[in-house]
Every structure is written in structure tokens, then in C-alpha cells.
Amino acid sequence: PPGRVYVSETLDVSNVELTGGGTVGTDTTTFVSVAGDEVFSVAPESADFDGVAPGSYDAESDDDDEAELTVVTPRITEFEVRNERGVDIEGDTVEASDFEEVTITAAYNFAEADRLDVTLESPDGTDLAGDRRITESGGSVTVDTSGADPGTYRIEVEGSNIEDGSRTATVTVAG
């Protein structure tokens, strides 16, 4: 202990060890922040941490006041969109010739809990990234964008289970 979970994550915490011995178990469990100002209850086998404030929490069913869970804010700490020449084009307007291939890189603090799904949406709504994913912090995916039509392209990385972990950028291709 303490087990680490992320704001907006939903997962099974029934096997989390209690600092006083045993595990959280399957009965509805109430957690109180170590500071004593936050309280929430969950069904441990499908605990939803959406809206839970970050911090350390003690299970009321435990006989001590030590934290069993730490709730952490998911963060994407680095997000880059680079063209085939390695130029960062996030937020820029570029010529189609400078948008032939895009590499999307992201570093994030919840890699042990989730992946990032990558979307590269063209002006007509087509997802050019397909089912691309970044599965480790600092990882990259490269998407072929050759023949890009003029307009604004939306690039997003988002946790598949941790909804609060996302970042979005745009690149406009001149017409």
C-alpha cells in the first residue's frame, strides 16, 4: 500500500492490500482522505474514481489511519506533432508538401494503467490514424498524411480507460 489509481479510472480494487492486514474485499467500501476532508464510497470490483479529488485515502474498514489508495491526476506531460523533417507543426499552418507524414509523440504519467488512443482527424472527419496507440510513455506513432486536402486537422491522444488523460492539437494545411 498504497495502491495507485487515477482520477476518472474505473477498475477492480478488491485485491488492494489494507495496511492493517487483508484486502479491500468485495463489500462497498468507504474511503476517507488522510487529511479528513474528502469521503467517497465504491463497489470495489468496479470502483469508479471519476470526480474523486487527488490525494491519499484510508479505507474505513481498516483499523488504522494509513493510506490504502493514492488517487493521482492523469497528465500528458509531453505532446508533439512533427512532420517528416522533424519540425514541430502543432498549431501551425503548413503547405501540403510539409504534411506528408506526421509523427505523434506523447509522455504521460499513467502508462502502467492505460494506453493512449491516437486520432488524426481530417477536415472531412476521417480518422487517418486508424487504430494507432501509444502503449508506453514517450512512445510515438507515425501516420501517412500524403495527399492531404487543405483544411484543419485535429490530432488527439486520449486514455482508453482514463478519460481525463487527453490532449488535442490542430494543424492547418494551406489551400
Image (tube, grey):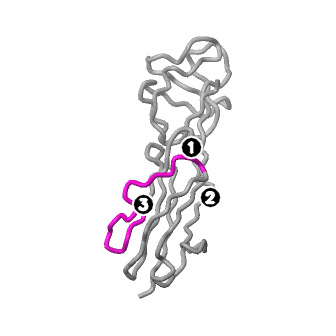
Q: Residue at x 50, y 69 (%)?
A: 102
Q: Residue at x 46, y 65 (%)?
A: 155
- Among numbered discs 2 and 1, the one appearing first in the sequence: 2
Q: Residue at x 64, y 27 (%)?
A: 2
Residue beneath label 3, please? 119
Nearest the eye: 157 or 135: 135
As shown in the figure, which amino acid type bears the numbered disc 2? Glu
Marks 2,3: beta carbons within 8 A: no
Is label 1 in a helix, a strand or a loop?
loop
- Quarter of the image with the N terminus is top right
Nearest the eye: 124 or 162: 124
Is label 2 in a helix, a strand or a loop?
strand
Give the vertical position of 67 relative to 48 (above or below).
above
Q: Position of residue 47 (x, y in %)?
A: 45, 30
Q: CA distance from mark 2 to mark 1?
A: 13 Å
Q: CA distance from mark 2 to mark 3?
A: 16 Å
- Among numbered discs 2 and 3, the one appearing first in the sequence: 2
Give the vertical position of 129 relative to 165 (above or below).
below
As shown in the figure, which amino acid type bears the numbered disc 3? Thr
Crowd rating for badge 2 (residues with CA inside 10 Å; few <14, some 14–19, many 20+) = few
Residue beneath label 2, please? 78
- Among numbered discs 3 and 1, the one appearing first in the sequence: 1
Q: Which mark is residue 111?
A: 1
As shown in the figure, which amino acid type bears the numbered disc 1? Ala
Q: Which mark is residue 130?
A: none
Magenta-colored span: 119-137
